[in-house]
Amino acid sequence: MSRFLSPHAQSITPYKPGEHPKGEGVVKLNTNECPYPPSPKVAAAIAAFDADALRLYPDPAGKEVRAAAAKAAGVCPEQVFVGGGSDEVLAYAFMAFCPQGEEVCFPDVTYDFYSVYSQLFGLKPKRIPVTETFEVKVEDYAAEVGPIFLANPNAPTGIVLSPSDIEALLRQNTDRLLVLDEAYIDFAPGQSCLSLIDTYDNLLIVRTASKSWALAGMRLGFAYGNPELIAALNRIQFSFNPYNLDRVSMAVALAALEDADWRRETVEKMIATRRRASQALEAIGFTVLPSSTNFLFAGHSGLSGQALCDGLRERNILVRYFDAPRTRGYVRISVGTDAEMDRLIQVCKDLAPA
Ligand SMILES: *Cc1c(COP(=O)(O)O)cnc(C)c1O
C-alpha cells in the first residue's frame, strides 16, 4: 500500500466485483448481467451518434433523460434523478442523507456495497439479521435509528417484500428515510413501490439499467422520490461530478426508454428460464430460495458453496460465492439463456453427491 494512502482509505475494505474472463467458452453467470443483447434501438442510437457532439459538455441536469424516464415511470421529471450507474446514485444518497459518525441500517445479508459505502462515508453500520430463511422482517427495524438501505428484491437472496410490507416500514417512522434499491424489481412483477413516492416523502427508490435493460456496460442509474429528495441528490451531484452522465449514455438511455416492448419480452423470457432452472435444480436435490430476480440463490446439503463454486469453475461455469457465515452454503447463479442453464444443471448434477 502506498505510504500516501490516508488512514481512512486504508481502513476500507473495497467492493469485490465478480471476475470478467477474457477467454471464449466460459458460461458467465456471476454478475447478474442480461444474457441477451439490449434493445435494437440502442444499437441504432449508437450508430447514429454524432461524435462531433463530444466536443461539448453534456447537459449537467440531464433534462431530456429525466423527462423520458419520468414519462416511462408515470411520474414528474422533478421526481427523477439520473446517474452513472445505480452504485453512483447510491453513493450520492449516502452522502446526502447519512450524517458522518451516525447510524445507517441494512440487512446482514444484502448487497455488499451498503457496507462499503458506510465505511467510505464514516458511518456506523447496523446490520439487522434476516431470518433463518433469509427474510427481511420490517418490525426488526423499529428498534434501530438512522436511514435504512434495503434492496428489494434483496440480493443475493432474491427474496422480495410486498409493497404493503414496505409501506409498513415507511409508516413506522415517517421522519426516517428508506432508500429502496429496486435493481431487480422488473423481475418481480407487481411488487414495485414506485407509486408510493407520491404519498411518502421518506421514500427514495433507486433503479438501474444494468440488469433488466441489458446495459451494464453503459452505467445508467435512476432515483425516484419526492422533489426535495431529488433536489438533495442534485446538490451532491453538483458538488462532486456535475457532468455525471455523458452524451453517449444519454443517447442510449433515451433509445432504451423508448422500447418498452423489448423490456417486457426480455423479462418474460428470463422469468420463464428462472422458473425452469429453479425446478430443475430442486429436482436434483438443491435448495433454491424463491427468486424474484434474474438470479438463483441455491445450495446443496452435501456440498459447501465454495466447493460448488470451485467445481463449476473447473468446468468453465462462473457463479458467485459469498464467503460469509450466513451465505456459506450457497452460490448465486445468474439466470442465463436456456442453453446456459441446461449446461449449469448438468454440471450441478455431476457435482452433487447422490
Ligand atoms: C447490480 C446492483 C446494483 C448496481 O447496479 P449498477 O447500476 O450497475 O451500478 C445496485 N444494487 C443492487 C442490489 C445490485 O444488485
Image (cartoon, rainbow, N blue to C red):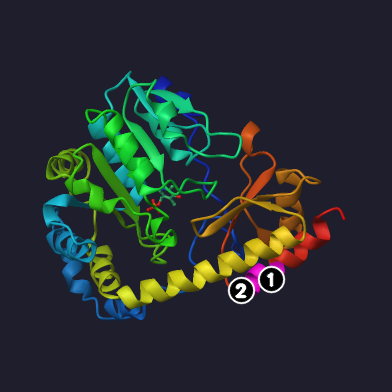
Q: Is residue 221 above or below residue 322?
A: below
Per the image, the residue denoted by label 1 is 342
Query: On the rendered structure, is 354 left or right of 281?
Result: right
Q: Residue at x 51, y 58 (%)?
A: 32
Mark 2 within 8 Å of ligand 1, using the beta carbon: no
Query: On the rendered structure, is 222 left or right of 76?
Result: right
Per the image, the residue denoted by label 2 is 338
Q: Residue at x 26, y 23 (%)?
A: 99
Q: Residues within 10 Å of mark 1 (few under 14, many from 20)?
A: some
Q: Is residue 340 magenta?
A: yes
Q: Amino acid at mark 2?
A: Asp
Tell me the magenta residue range.
338-343
The quadrant the C terminus occupies is: bottom right
Q: Position of residue 245 (x, y in %)?
A: 24, 56
Q: Residue at x 25, y 80 (%)?
A: 48
Q: Is residue 280 above or below residue 195?
A: below
Mark sitting on residue 211: none
Query: On the rendered structure, is 105 left or right of 346?
Result: left
Most common secondary structure along the magenta stretch: helix
Q: Quadrant of residue 166 in the image? A: top left
Q: Residues within 10 Å of mark 2 (few under 14, many from 20)?
A: some
